[in-house]
Image: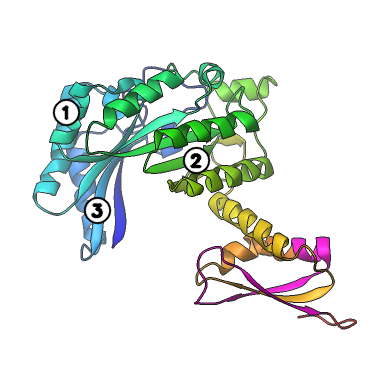
């Protein structure tokens, strides 16, 4: 069954603070205020484009702190989506919010109107990072919110950022370990981008903040992804989704921006696996077999992994598909090169 999200962006609604990294109207690419009519129109338009046969469809309220919106407004927006649940046209509602805007009254209301998934913007479990980032909540707030949510039948998602002010590789690893202890069903990983018209842009331009490079963010997120996978926690997003604003020439001033960031991380994992299997091999022609649908990840963005094998070990590699292999399972067939020979 294929899953579809119908995105409804509520940029900066319900947010009591301006986090140093945040300009939701640029990130989401919309300046429009959301009304019940907006929700209704958006759902209708998306349903026209979705083959509802064998599909799981959810309305997703993203871009702000949904539960920070006045309760009456929350209800007015949710009730529109709930109508489509009752009609059997969608299957649930997901939303993102802050850890300090969770209480039983709010959760009772979300359950009443068909919310199925709550994603908390955790960002970090290091309190000094949260303070430096202007989050206005603590790691304890995260733990308390998760405990309350776990009293209900919601799916829990936690969102994590890397490269925030005062953050380090070690602090991000610590955050991942603390998130794993909370056992969410899903996680999103977002390397911090410096966006126009934010406090982080001012800090960057005044040499008060140093953003991650793409390579640094990939190296860290590779380790984080493997940790979450080992804990059976699904990572559903690596990096912000590209939009007109989140793109080259858009609103990103600095940071690890890449349109295929998630694939870079997956490719880095494949390179480690392949390199380990080839640790005693040099000057060879190599056939590398991977699972169906995994060739592009194993090859790397712009054939990066093949180039590294050539430059570092003088290995000419060709990556092929084997339908009998599973994800990240790699089989090597190495043949010693004849002089001047290659694949």
* SS category of the residue bearing label 3: strand
Instruction: Compute the Cα span from label 1 to label 2.
Output: 28 Å
For this view, does 146 lie left or right of residue 276? Answer: left
Q: Position of residue 244 (x, y in %)?
A: 48, 45
Kindly identify which residue carries mark 1: 108
Instruction: Compute the Cα span from label 1 to label 3.
Output: 22 Å
Q: Residue at x 9, y 51 (%)?
A: 87
- Neighbor class of circle 2 (other Cα within 10 Å; few <14, some 14-19, many 20+) is many
Q: Quadrant of residue 64?
A: top left
Task: Compare residues 333 and 53 and report the one nearer the observer.
Answer: 333
Task: Compare residues 141 and 110 and report the one nearer the observer.
Answer: 141
- Neighbor class of circle 1 (other Cα within 10 Å; few <14, some 14-19, many 20+) is few
Magenta stretch contains residue 312: yes
Which image quadrant: the N terminus? bottom left
76 is higher (above) or lower (below) than 338:
above
Q: Is residue 45 visible?
A: yes
Earlier in the chain: of badge 1 and badge 3, it is 3
Q: Residue at x 53, y 44 (%)?
A: 227
Q: Quadrant of residue 268?
A: bottom right
45 is higher (above) or lower (below) than 19:
below
Task: Compare residues 92 and 42 and report the one nearer the observer.
Answer: 92
* SS category of the residue bearing label 1: helix
Query: Which mark is on residue 93?
Result: none
Which image quadrant: the C terminus? bottom right
Kindly identify which residue carries mark 3: 57
For this view, does 16 lie left or right of residue 126? Answer: left
- Please report the bounds of the magenta region as a residue range: 308-336
Query: Which mark is on residue 189?
Result: 2
């Amino acid at each position: 069954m294929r899953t579809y999200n119908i995105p409804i962006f509520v940029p900066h609604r319900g947010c009591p603070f301006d986090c140093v990294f945040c300009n939701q109207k640029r990130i989401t690419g919309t300046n429009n205020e959301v009304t019940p009519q907006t929700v209704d129109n958006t759902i209708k338009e998306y349903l026209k484009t979705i083959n509802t046969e064998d599909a799981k469809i959810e309305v997703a309220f993203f871009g702000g702190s949904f539960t920070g919106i006045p309760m009456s407004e929350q209800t007015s927006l949710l009730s529109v989506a709930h109508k489509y649940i009752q009609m059997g046209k969608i299957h649930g509602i997901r939303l993102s919010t802050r850890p300090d805007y969770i209480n039983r009254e709010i959760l009772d209301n979300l359950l009443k109107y068909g919310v199925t998934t709550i994603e908390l913007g955790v960002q970090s479990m290091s309190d000094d990072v949260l303070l430096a980032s202007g989050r206005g909540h603590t790691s304890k707030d995260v733990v308390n919110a998760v405990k309350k949510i776990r009293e209900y039948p919601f799916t829990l998602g936690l969102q994590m950022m890397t490269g925030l002010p005062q953050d380090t590789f070690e602090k991000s690893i610590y955050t991942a370990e603390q998130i794993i202890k909370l056992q969410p069903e899903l996680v999103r990983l977002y390397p911090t981008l410096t966006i126009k018209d934010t406090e982080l842009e001012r800090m960057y331009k005044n040499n008060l903040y140093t953003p991650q490079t793409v390579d640094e963010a990939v190296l860290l997120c590779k380790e984080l992804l493997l940790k979450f996978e080992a804990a059976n926690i699904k990572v559903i997003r690596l990096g912000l989704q590209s939009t007109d604003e989140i793109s080259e020439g858009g609103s990103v001033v600095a940071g690890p921006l890449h349109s295929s960031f998630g694939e870079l991380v997956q490719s880095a994992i494949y390179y480690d696996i392949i390199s380990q299997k080839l640790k005693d091999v040099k000057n060879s022609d190599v056939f590398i077999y991977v699972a169906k649908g995994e060739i592009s990840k194993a090859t790397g963005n712009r054939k990066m992994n093949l180039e590294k094998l050539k430059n570092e070990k003088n290995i000419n590699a060709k990556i092929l598909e084997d339908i009998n292999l599973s994800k990240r399972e790699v089989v090597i067939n190495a043949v010693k090169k004849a002089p001047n020979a290659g694949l």
